[in-house]
């Protein structure tokens, strides 16, 4: 006896069939469900993994419970006028020959939450369903999506896995929640939207099929009707003169898997304790009496529904097996990867010590790798690690110093005042060195702040690098992570101090000794030559008839000769020979310090002053009023004209710029070296040693490696999931191996029988 399909694509049973092909495949799915049952809702923990099953949906009082009880042949479901099914009931029907391999010869039920207890009295099963429902949702009429698992083993059932879902409700009744309809619909949709689910849509015959809630919801998720089976109940209470023939033939609402019509027990039959056997006998007699259903015998009755469900579910599972195996393997790989992130549970101090040393070592190595640019997690989107430190040195620090003009904050007036102050109570014979040294020291001191800023930037980068080196283990041990960050921050902060002292010393060294003998320093002679060229270029644009320009040129020549070592007498002689100046020091009060050499004029002036004072003493009555001097102001500035000291100002600027460039190059080279030596390379060399010194102590092992309760819970659940997936994969592999062995045996016997894995039947039945 085999299976074939008629012209309408409905599943039919041929007369020479002695067993159902699903007797081997459907129990495989039941076994997988048993494996995953302790994990709860696997859809929440294994996204996208749904095992094949039949979802039974229908409105309240549509006859769902009667259909399920008829399939089992026992009364075991809660009954009543209100909503009875308030939690999904996963019902596994397993055909088992009682007494074979089992000392117990009775049929029984077994709940998933009571795996070691068998229920032989099916009224006790009903009570247990009520008790377990009340535990979850209380005594009101609320609903919950937490499943109740029930396996029924009996020789009178076919292998089918069904999920009885709460009946679709429109209006809250009694103390039901106001959103009861939305809750139930959402729960039903979560089951039937899965492609692995076969939808058993139950609709009463005494209602308009076009308004069936079950068929409407099924059409939303299965618009082509390829995985929906229609069940039309209560055919015996239809209005006289009407029948369900067009419904059963699919002429009203077509379904690819067809319809089955059944006759239910009425509520009065249930109250009168009419047995399932009597109800099935009545159903058979009903279809015999109504000639309109004679030609539809393959679509009528509970036995035909059981056979249809068994065969369709078996072929559905068979088609899904390759995908199911792939999904199980992919989920197993993902769960094993997640489990590795949690690591192994640490039981002893030796394990904790090894783990701690491993974490400290990996962290230090990761830190050095990021600094050296050898990290495996190197990004290609932006600079990171040591590359950022190099950028700070070259593109920020060095470039910023090169852009600084050392004389931008020195005005001519500042330099003029500095020259006056450097001469004290005398006039300068030469361009004084003191103003140059004072001013160049001030400019060198400006290099300290950017150097220390560079150090701070590198320190900040090292802090970022330390935080980017977090390992998987540090996510487990938050206390270790906190202590690591604290030790690293303190260690780097301590490394900043010697680097800061070294940088400060470098600047102090440059300020403490102005090395005017440096080979790259321009020197006084060259500076004067450059100043003359600069002033000459400036004067070429002035009018030729201005006397100050001529005097200025004469002054430049004089200064140049002084800087080149000419004596004052030679200067006077040269000027006299040229006939350009008769005497020195008489034209202005500033005489370059040579007026003291002309002592005769100075004595004449002194004697004249003494005679005048004596005359005044003897003739005081006729003296004019005394001359009163003005008090010097609190802030005194020189009164020279703008042309005074112009040569010296230009020379001073040239000397400052020349020497500043020498110091700047030294600082640009030595500051990065100091930072690398005292901070960066010091951290690479000594970070691990500091960790071991501060943290690797036996009395700290337990505190540092204390895991959060959340991590412990996640690891435990992940271990359970991993074991379940491994067991499921092994079960599936064993099943495939058994089938391969069976195939080989069939081939050796040259039997024309087709394997259950063949897809010929299902493809024909769906064509």
Image (cartoon, grey):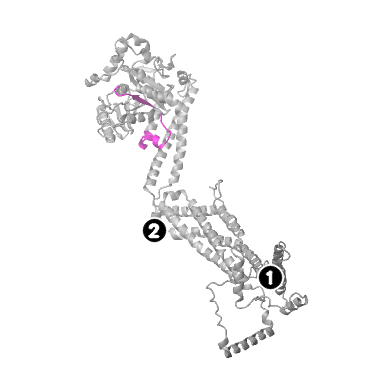
Residue matched to label 2:
699
Taking the image as shown, residue 231 lies to the left or right of residue 663, namely left
- Confirm or deny contact between disc 2 and disc 1 (CB under 8 A): no
Find residue 11 and report its image quarter.
top left
Residue 542 or 724: which is nearer the viewer?
542
Q: Tag on residue 263?
A: none
State the image coordinates of residue 502 (x, y, percent, origin top left): 55, 65
- Which quadrant of the rendered structure holds the N terminus? top left
Graded by Cα atoms within 10 Å as few (under 14), some (14 to 19) or many (20 or more), the crowding at tag 1 reads: some
State the image coordinates of residue 379 (x, y, percent, origin top left): 55, 47
Q: Is residue 73 above or below residue 699?
A: above
Nearer to us of marks 2 and 1 is 1
- The secondary structure type at the circle numbered 1 is helix
Residue 535 or 767: which is nearer the viewer?
535
Residue drawn at point x = 41 percent, y = 19 percent? 255
Residue 694 or 180: which is nearer the viewer?
180
Q: Is residue 57 magenta?
A: yes
Q: Is residue 444 above or below residue 336?
A: below
Q: Residue lying at the far left in this picture: please name it.
A: 272
Q: Is residue 49 above or below residue 504?
A: above
Find residue 116 and report its image quarter.
top left
Magenta region: which residues? 34-61
Find residue 234 and report its image quarter.
top left
Residue matched to label 1:
524
């Amino acid at each position: 006896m085999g299976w074939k399909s008629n012209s309408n694509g409905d599943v039919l049973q041929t007369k020479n069939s002695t067993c159902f092909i699903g007797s081997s495949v459907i129990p495989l799915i039941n076994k997988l469900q048993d494996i995953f049952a302790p994990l709860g809702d696997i859809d929440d923990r294994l996204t996208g993994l749904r095992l094949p099953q039949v979802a039974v949906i229908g409105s309240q009082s549509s006859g769902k419970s009667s259909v399920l009880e008829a399939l089992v042949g026992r009364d075991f479901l809660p009954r009543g006028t209100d909503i009875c099914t308030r939690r999904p009931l996963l019902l596994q029907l397993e055909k088992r020959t009682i007494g074979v391999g089992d000392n117990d010869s009775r049929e029984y039920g077994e709940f998933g939450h009571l795996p070691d207890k068998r229920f032989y009295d099916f009224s006790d099963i009903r009570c247990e369903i009520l008790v377990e429902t009340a535990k979850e949702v209380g005594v009101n009429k609320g609903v919950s999506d937490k499943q109740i698992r029930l396996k029924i083993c009996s020789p009178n059932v076919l292998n089918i896995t069904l999920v009885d879902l709460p009946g679709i409700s429109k209006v809250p009744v009694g103390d039901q929640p106001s959103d009861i309809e939305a809750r139930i619909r959402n729960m039903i949709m979560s089951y039937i939207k899965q492609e692995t689910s076969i939808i058993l849509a139950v609709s009463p015959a005494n209602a308009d099929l076009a308004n069936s809630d079950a068929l409407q919801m099924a059409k939303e998720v299965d618009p082509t009707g390829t995985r929906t089976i229609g069940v039309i109940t209560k055919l015996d209470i239809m209005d006289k003169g009407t029948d369900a023939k067009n419904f059963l033939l699919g002429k009203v609402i077509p379904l690819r898997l067809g319809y089955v019509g059944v006759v239910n027990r009425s509520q009065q039959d249930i109250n009168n304790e009419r047995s399932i056997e009597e109800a099935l006998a009545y159903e058979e007699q009903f279809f015999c009496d109504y000639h309109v259903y004679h030609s539809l015998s393959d679509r009528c009755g509970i036995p035909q529904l059981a056979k249809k469900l068994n065969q369709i579910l078996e072929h559905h599972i068979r088609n899904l097996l390759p995908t199911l195996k792939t999904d199980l393997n992919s989920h197993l790989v993902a769960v094993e990867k997640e489990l590795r992130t949690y690591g192994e549970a640490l039981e002893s101090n030796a394990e904790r010590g090894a783990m701690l040393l491993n974490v400290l070592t990996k962290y230090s190595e990761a830190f050095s790798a990021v600094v050296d640019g050898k990290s495996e997690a190197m990004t290609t989107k932006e600079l990171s690690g040591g590359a950022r430190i190099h950028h700070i040195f070259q593109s920020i620090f060095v470039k910023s110093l090169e852009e600084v003009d050392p004389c931008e904050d020195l005005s001519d007036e500042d330099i003029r005042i500095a020259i006056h102050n450097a001469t004290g109570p005398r006039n300068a014979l030469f361009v004084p060195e003191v103003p140059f040294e004072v001013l160049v020291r001030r400019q060198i001191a400006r290099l300290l702040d950017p150097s220390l800023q560079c150090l701070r930037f590198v320190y900040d980068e090292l802090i970022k690098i330390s935080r980017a080196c977090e390992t998987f283990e540090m996510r487990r041990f938050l206390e270790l992570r906190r202590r690591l960050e604290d030790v690293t921050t303190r260690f780097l902060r301590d490394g900043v101090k010697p680097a800061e002292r070294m940088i400060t010393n470098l600047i102090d060294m440059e300020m403490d000794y102005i090395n005017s003998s440096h080979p790259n320093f321009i020197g006084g002679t060259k500076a004067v030559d450059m100043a003359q060229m600069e002033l000459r270029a400036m004067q070429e644009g002035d009018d030729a008839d201005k006397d100050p320009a001529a005097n200025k040129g004469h002054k430049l020549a004089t200064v140049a000769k002084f800087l080149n070592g000419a004596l004052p007498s030679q200067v006077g002689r040269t000027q006299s020979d040229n006939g350009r100046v008769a005497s020195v020091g008489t034209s202005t009060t500033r005489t370059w310090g040579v007026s003291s050499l002309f002592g005769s004029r100075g004595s004449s002036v002194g004697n004249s002053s003494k005679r005048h004072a004596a005359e005044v003493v003897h003739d005081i009555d006729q003296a004019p009023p005394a001359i009163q001097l003005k008090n010097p102001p609190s802030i005194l500035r020189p009164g020279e004209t703008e042309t005074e000291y112009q040569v010296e100002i230009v020379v001073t600027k040239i000397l400052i710029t020349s020497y500043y460039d020498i110091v700047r190059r030294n600082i640009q080279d030595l500051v990065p070296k100091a930072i690398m030596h005292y901070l960066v390379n010091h951290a690479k060399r000594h970070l691990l040693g500091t960790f071991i010194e501060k943290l690797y102590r036996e009395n700290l092992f337990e505190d540092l490696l204390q895991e959060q309760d959340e991590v412990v819970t996640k690891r435990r659940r992940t271990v359970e999931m991993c074991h379940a997936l491994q067991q499921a994969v092994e079960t599936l592999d064993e099943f495939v191996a058994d089938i391969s062995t069976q195939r080989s045996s069939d081939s050796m016997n040259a039997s024309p029988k087709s394997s259950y894995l063949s897809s010929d039947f299902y493809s024909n039945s769906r064509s």
